[in-house]
Amino acid sequence: MEMKVIEPAETLADIVLSMNDHMEELAADGEWEKISDLLVKRNAMLREIADDEKAPVLKATDRSTERIRKLAQKAHGDVGQQLAQLHRGKEATDSYLAHA
């Protein structure tokens, strides 16, 4: 007779930690709107985690949020650079057309 291994149910803390990982992946892909939606859900879940599990989950969440914030800053800088390039291209085009 085979013995079945019963997997323990995923805790709320496990779900939050998994959400952190998923949000970091989304940030790396520039999926900011999806992250915004998940942040609301994740933060609500954080309030519901049992006190004895809360400290390590909050610490991991803080680290994850900081990594996401850094990716957001980088994306913001990248967009700023792209806009500056577009503006320079427009200026060059305008100058060319003005002297043509």
Image (spheres, rainbow, N blue to C red):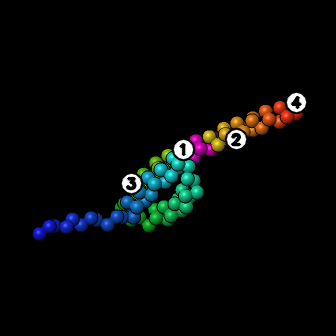
Closer to the camera: disc 3 or disc 4?
4
Q: Mark 1 to mark 4: distance in Å?
A: 44 Å
Seen as rendered, the residue at the extreme left is 1
Tell me the number on the disc at residue 88: none
Task: Out of 56 and 6, give the one closest to the viewer.
Answer: 6
Mark closest to the chain's N terminus, 3 or 4: 3
Mark closest to the chain's N terminus, 2 or 1: 1
Q: Which residue is mark 3?
A: 56
Segment colored magenta: 69-77
Res 33 seen here:
yes
Q: Secondary structure at mark 2?
A: helix
Q: Which residue is mark 1?
A: 70
Q: Which residue is mark 2?
A: 83
Q: Secondary structure at mark 4?
A: helix
Mark closest to the chain's N terminus, 1 or 3: 3
Seen as rendered, the residue at the extreme right is 99
